[in-house]
Image (cartoon, rainbow, N blue to C red):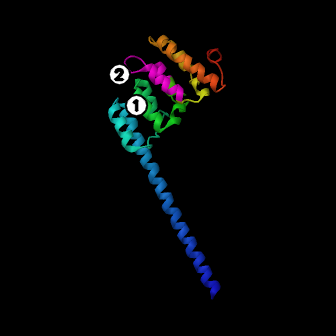
Amino acid sequence: MQKIKIQELEKQNADAAAGLKKMEDAATSSDSALQSKVGEEIFDLMTNDNFTAAIWKMKTSGPHIQFKDAGGVTALHRAARAGHRHATRRLLQLWPDSANCSTYASRSPGKWTALHMIADATKQQLCPDSDVAGVARLLVQAMDGFMIGQQNSTGNTAFHLAAARPFGLTFLQQVLPMMEAKLLEENVTTIQEILQ
């Protein structure tokens, strides 16, 4: 009789544990859906150059910003392409690893980091109050050293892309010393080796 009661209690415990697991899984799924939805909203705002609304949304939504489009582009890629320092800073505060995200290799051109985006930005793509060097400095500070010299799918680094732009010399003069220091600090490589 006592053995039967113990078995019944063990079954009730197992049922309760299974129910708790289902509730935890539902909460995790709900959090992922919320994160994806908010991240997509922020991405869309960045894509439409609505940086003020995107920054406000990030302040009110917290860390739920991890979203990539079908090509692997993040909101950080969009903010960097526009040269928007405040949006870049906020995105890096909430999702520091996004500095190391690159677009998917299948994208044309692929394997672009946000640093590639700002290095290749044209005057038409930059927002009116853009800060190209400021955005680049924020990105370099946040990136892992090995990502600074990342080649895109066509073999170009951010240095190569910047050199081809009208403001590229200014960009390189302002950012290269910081990049070199980061590479040396992390004992990854040197700029000379990257450019060879």
Q: In which quadrant is the N terminus drawn?
A: bottom right
Residue type, numbered disc 2: Asp
Q: Is residue 160 magenta?
A: no
Per the image, label 1 sits on a secondary structure element best described as: helix
Query: Where, by quadrant of the figure, is residue 38 drawn?
Result: top left
Q: How many marks?
A: 2
The residue tagged 2 is: 129
Residue situated furthest bottom in the rendering: 1
Q: Residue at x 38, y 40 (%)?
A: 59
Magenta span has 130? yes
Amino acid on which disc 1 is placed: Ala
On the image, which quarter does residue 147 sit in? Answer: top right
Image point 53% across, 20% down: which residue?
158
The tag on residue 87 is 1
Whole-percent x, y for residue 157 in the image: 56, 20
Side (left or right) of 53 relative to 117 = left
Q: Is residue 155 visible?
A: no
Give the CA distance from mark 2 to mark 1: 12 Å
Where is residue 93? Give x, y as percent: 47, 36
Q: Which residues are magenta?
A: 116-141
Q: Quadrant of the C terminus?
A: top right
Whether residue 69 is situated above or below residue 162 in the rendered picture:
below
Does residue 185 lie above or below 23 as drawn? above
Disc nearer the start of the sequence (2/1): 1
Question: The residue tagged with tag 2: helix, strand or loop?
Answer: loop
